[in-house]
Image (spheres, grey):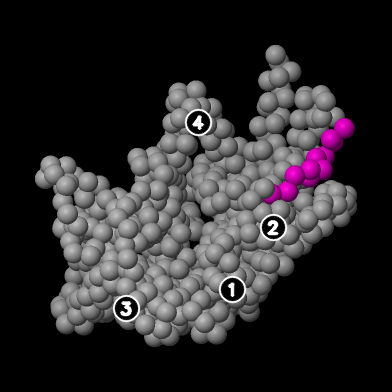
């Protein structure tokens, strides 16, 4: 049996995991399932793509790719700016839409609003960039053998490393910093948290900024290794939800683990059921979790 | 000229009322019971495909084509969609309300992928053609055909409307609303919230399945592309604009939003050059999305608010009393 699916699955899973962190944080801190989270992935990828082009235009000459990778420093710089911009986009959406509905205290209205926002944001991307797929680079990459018949391109290796750095950094933020502790406190019990002096509004802002930035990172990973399309985030939405629920709502390590499992399940299932049903694999995982253990792997509540 | 206009009016209203039937189903789920269904496209698709498989003539290379009468197809569509909703509802209605949203979203994707890929059953990307159209013998005369179909669809809408109104105004509807407003209080008087929610979810989905079948037969052709999340979105906008919790509002919203949608389609088709049509279509969706968000923020009750009645025997509450908010 060819073991390549393990590498592909873990790589796809890392992208899903990065996105699922934002979903699980929004769900546990703001208490609603955000259907617009996939659009942060797509907008982040388009922001990075546009900024990379802009940097290339400003520099005025071709920039050689770094070492064995398909991209140069402009993409890394653009990626960092795009992450900040996507965080701000998430924050802006909160100010314009969600904060107004939050006061009414009906979570399901927020879900509906996020559903509307997701369609509007996605169609806006389609309007600006058309649905023609775009690429960060057209360089051809030679895959590195990893043994056991498994191969990985240098790009994938680097991105996998960067994703690991982001997850570890995020983990440290959540466990070692004041804002991280405040976020966990609000997710446990918002009333109690505000009674002991946690600034809930600040926690909400941090949640959107971090969730948006990580979604952007996931979008750039998808963009570099696959392609950039307006529907790229929408197609990831079901895997994101499946990963967040599988990991247990509110659990950041759970979201990452859930992402890796969903990614592996997709990669393992595609040779069996055909690539056409790839999108349904996450649905099967979701249903299995709801039947067996609705609280997920590391979750405490439904 | 007047005949053309009349035929178009009948055609337009037929399409709008089919959406109206879907809206009535959603109103039972969301308006009365507070269930958030994001998989409308999937339930509509199941109804359309069920009826198409049962009523089309035998087709080589594809399962079925059983050549049954249209009525059988429509009833089966409602039944099969209801059974699917029963399974999904039994799984998710015991959990937090968001789980139903996420699961139904997944259901719609899984159904659309199956329609696209399971060629032996669904005809794959090419869909199913030659679905018998009601009054097919009148097809030569556009006016007679459109008007006859309009009358038929209006009759179906009326039956669904009257049926749901009776249910909703009766004891059953009161229990649904009491669970929506205060589940603990409803449980305290011995009402099993989960069972009632499941009933509302199944019945609403069955109505959506019926509407899907009616639509499939009216157009005469179905394909997976008809059942993307855009249709779910349109129906939601219709219900929210019309007024959730109000069956008249559901129908009014369907006609109003379908009018906006068709009107803006016609407008973009004339304003934008042919190579920019796809772009213009996405702009149209942006505008409708903004409309939904805007109404949620500014006028959450929609055009016709939910009538604040407890029971028809008690009569209407006075206007000055605080309204119940969903």
Instruction: Confirm whether circles 3 and 1 share one chain.
Output: yes
Question: What subunit carries mark 3?
Answer: A
Q: Is residue B128 magenta?
A: yes
**Above or below B316: residue B257:** above
Instruction: Work out how far the residue at label 4 is from the one at label 3, CA to CA, in angstroms.
Output: 44 Å
| First of labels 2, 4 by sequence position | 2
Quadrant of the rendered image containing residue A125 = top left
In the image, taking residue A89 as reference, residue A8 lies left or right, namely right
Q: Are marks 4 and 3 in contact (CB under 8 Å)?
A: no
Residue mark closest to the camera, 2 vs 3: 2
Tell me which segment is drawn in magenta.
B127-137
Q: Which mark is residue A272?
A: 1
Q: Which SS does the magenta portion mostly show?
A: loop
Q: Does the magenta stretch include residue A85?
A: no
Q: For the residue carrying disc 3, how many other residues have a C-alpha within 10 Å: few (<14), some (14-19), or many (20+)?
A: many
Residue mark closest to the camera, 2 vs 4: 2
Q: What element carries label 3?
A: helix
| First of labels 3, 1 by sequence position | 3
**To which residue does mark 4 refer?**
B264
Instruction: Work out how far the residue at label 2 is from the one at label 3, CA to CA, in angstroms.
Output: 40 Å
- Residue drawn 44% across the image and 40% down it: B282
**To which residue does mark 2 refer?**
B119
Between A59 and B27, the residue placed more toward the observer is A59
Residue mark closest to the camera, 3 vs 1: 1
Q: Are marks 2 and 4 in contact (CB under 8 Å)?
A: no
């Amino acid at each position: 049996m060819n073991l390549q699916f393990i590498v592909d699955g873990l790589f796809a899973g890392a992208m899903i995991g990065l996105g699922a962190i934002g979903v699980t944080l929004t769900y546990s801190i703001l208490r609603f399932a955000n259907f617009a989270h996939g659009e942060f992935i797509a907008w982040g990828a388009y922001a990075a793509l546009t900024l990379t082009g802009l940097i290339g235009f400003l520099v005025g000459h071709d920039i050689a790719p770094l070492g064995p990778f398909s991209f140069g420093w402009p993409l890394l710089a653009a990626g960092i700016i795009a992450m900040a911009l996507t965080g701000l986009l998430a924050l802006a959406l909160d100010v314009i839409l969600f904060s107004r509905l939050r006061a009414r205290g009906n979570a399901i209205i927020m879900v509906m609003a996020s559903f509307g926002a997701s369609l509007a944001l996605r169609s806006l991307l389609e309007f600006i960039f058309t649905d023609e797929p775009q690429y960060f680079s057209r360089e051809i990459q030679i895959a590195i053998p990893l043994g056991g018949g498994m191969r990985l391109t240098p790009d994938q290796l680097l991105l996998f490393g960067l994703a690991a750095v982001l997850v570890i950094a995020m983990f440290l933020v959540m466990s070692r910093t004041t804002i991280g502790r405040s976020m966990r406190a609000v997710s446990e019990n918002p009333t109690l948290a505000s009674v002991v002096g946690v600034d809930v509004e600040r926690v909400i802002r941090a949640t959107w900024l971090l969730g948006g930035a990580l979604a952007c990172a996931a979008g750039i990973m998808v963009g570099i290794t696959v392609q950039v399309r307006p529907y790229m985030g929408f197609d990831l939405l079901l895997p994101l939800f499946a990963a967040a629920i599988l990991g247990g709502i509110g659990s950041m390590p759970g979201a990452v683990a859930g992402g890796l499992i969903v990614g592996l399940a997709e990669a393992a299932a595609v040779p069996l059921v055909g690539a056409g049903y790839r999108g349904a694999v996450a649905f099967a995982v979701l249903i299995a979790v709801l039947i067996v253990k609705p609280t997920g792997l590391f979750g405490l509540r439904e | 000229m007047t005949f053309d206009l009349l035929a178009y009016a009948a055609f337009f209203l037929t399409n709008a009322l089919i959406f109206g039937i879907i809206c009535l189903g959603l109103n039972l789920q969301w308006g009365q019971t507070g269930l958030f269904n994001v998989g409308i496209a999937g339930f509509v698709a199941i109804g359309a495909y069920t009826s198409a498989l049962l009523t089309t003539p035998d087709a080589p290379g594809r399962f079925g084509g059983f050549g049954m009468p249209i009525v059988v197809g429509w009833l089966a569509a409602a039944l099969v969609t209801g059974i699917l909703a029963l399974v999904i509802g039994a799984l998710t209605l015991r959990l937090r309300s968001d789980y139903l949203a996420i699961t139904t979203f997944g259901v719609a994707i899984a159904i659309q992928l199956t329609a696209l890929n399971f060629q032996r059953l669904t005809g794959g990307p090419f869909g199913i053609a030659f679905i018998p159209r009601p009054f097919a013998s009148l097809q030569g005369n556009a006016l007679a055909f459109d008007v006859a179909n309009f009358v038929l669809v209006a009759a179906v809408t009326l039956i669904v409307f009257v049926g749901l109104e009776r249910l909703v105004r009766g004891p059953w509807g009161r229990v649904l609303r009491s669970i929506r407003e205060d589940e603990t209080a409803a449980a305290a008087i011995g009402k099993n919230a989960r069972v009632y929610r499941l009933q509302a979810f199944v019945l609403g989905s069955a109505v959506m399945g019926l509407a899907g079948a009616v639509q499939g037969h009216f157009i005469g052709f179905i394909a997976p592309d008809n059942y993307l999340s855009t249709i779910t979105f349109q129906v939601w906008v219709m219900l929210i604009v019309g007024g959730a919790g109000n069956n008249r509002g559901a129908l009014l919203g369907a006609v109003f939003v379908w009018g906006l949608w068709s009107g803006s389609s016609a407008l973009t088709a004339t304003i934008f050059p042919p190579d920019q049509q796809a772009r213009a279509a996405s702009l149209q969706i942006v505008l409708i999305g903004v409309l939904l968000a805007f109404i949620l923020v500014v006028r959450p009750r929609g055009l016709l608010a939910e009538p604040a009645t407890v029971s028809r025997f008690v009569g209407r509450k006075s206007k000055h009393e605080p309204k119940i908010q969903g």
